[in-house]
Amino acid sequence: MWSASASVGAQNDGAAQAPSSFQVRARKIEDRPGDAKYILESLALGTSARSFSGMPHPEFPNLTVLDHPLIRHKLTILRDKNTTTRDFKQLVNEIATLMAYEVTKDLPVEPVDVDTPLERMRGVRVAGKKLALVPILRAGLGMVEGIAQLIPSARVGHIGIYREHDTLEPVDYYFKIPSGEEARDFFVLDPMLATGGSAVDAVGALKHAGAQRIRFLSLVAAPEGVRRMLDAHPDVPIFAAALDRELDANGYILPGLGDAGDRLFGTR
Ligand code: PRP
Ligand code: URA
């Protein structure tokens, strides 16, 4: 296993210093040779492989950094200050789609019969109530379509929060989510997890409304925000495309990608 004291920080594309999922798989097989057959079968079937990719970050048990090469590649272009608004929008959606694939891999399924052109067989469908995507306005909106491409039946709620410029404290201005909160999976979307104030506030509001199963998806996270979420909502897993180094004096993520809302909507 890799060292639990691996430092938090940006490396080229800003990803944390955890091994790749491929390395993790290889080492797991080395560590437990008796399990190798099971692991290889699982990978081939694409079924129970989830404990060998998307491992929790060594310093933050609530964080999983999704380090797929395509995510890292697209995120690097996203960070580029010369990337246009049009490309920025498209890349945010594409990364969100790739993240959705990983983030949904443990959703429960139930059996369902289907008639192929040749015979009846037993397949599966995702069980339970339709899940809810909840973007934090504004920048979270940029992730909705990318995820809805994989999960078109998802419901969409909205939480309006902005950071007050001087204090960096979150200010709420809108809240509307689908009913059936207790039985639904909620995916809170926001490209940036900086101080964590907005995320903690949004998740608190969802819980207050009755939500019990919440995941938080962001593109770039700062250690400060991940820690604040761990303290306030240790039950909420965070999935990020990268864990960056730190916040600057104005609460911006370094190296980050700037102001996500402004870059997404062409404001400023
Ligand atoms: C950005 C971002 C997050 C928040 C993160 O929104 O989209 O919601 O900042 O910062 P925090 O972790 O320190 O709370 P912003 O306040 O700029 O609002 P906007 O998207 O409406 O511009
Ligand atoms: N919000 C952003 O849009 N970017 C940051 O770096 C921090 C907060």
Image (cartoon, grey):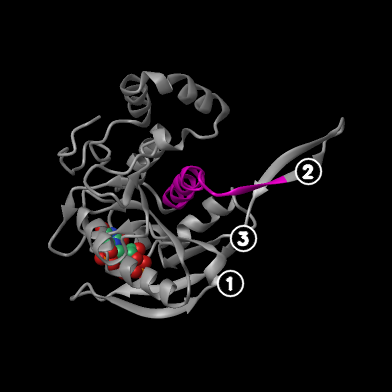
- Residue 44 place in picture, x, y as percent: 54, 24
Q: Mark 2 near ligand 1 (CB under 8 Å)?
A: no
The answer to whether 25 appears left or right of 145 in the picture is: left
Ligand 2, by image quadrant, is bottom left
Whether residue 259 is visible, yes or no, is no
The disc, 2 or 1, on the residue closer to the chain's N-terminal end is 2
Going by the picture, which residue comes out furthest to the left?
A: 249
Q: Which residue is mark 3?
A: 130
Q: Which residues are magenta?
A: 86-111
What residue do we see at 21% from left, 42% from top?
10
Judging from the image, what secondary structure is the residue with disc 1 in?
A: loop
When asked about the image quadrant of residue 161, the answer is bottom left
Going by the picture, which residue comes out furthest to the front?
A: 34
What residue do we see at 25% from left, 42% from top?
14
| In the image, residue 110 lies in the stretch drawn in magenta | yes
Compared with residue 91, is residue 137 higher up or lower down, i.e. above or below?
below
Q: Which mark is residue 82?
A: none
Front residue (pair 2, 265): 2
Q: Residues within 10 Å of mark 2 (few under 14, many from 20)?
A: few
The disc, 3 or 2, on the residue closer to the chain's N-terminal end is 2
Q: Which residue is mark 1?
A: 180
Distance Cα–Cα, label 2 vs label 1: 27 Å
Q: In which quadrant is the C terminus drawn? A: bottom left
Whether residue 144 is visible, yes or no, is yes
Front residue (pair 21, 137): 21
What residue do we see at 21% from left, 48% from top?
255
The answer to whether 114 appears left or right of 68 in the picture is: right
The answer to whether 149 appears left or right of 258 in the picture is: right
Q: Which residue is mark 2?
A: 113
Q: Mark 3 near ligand 1 (CB under 8 Å)?
A: no
Compared with residue 164, is residue 145 higher up or lower down, i.e. above or below?
above
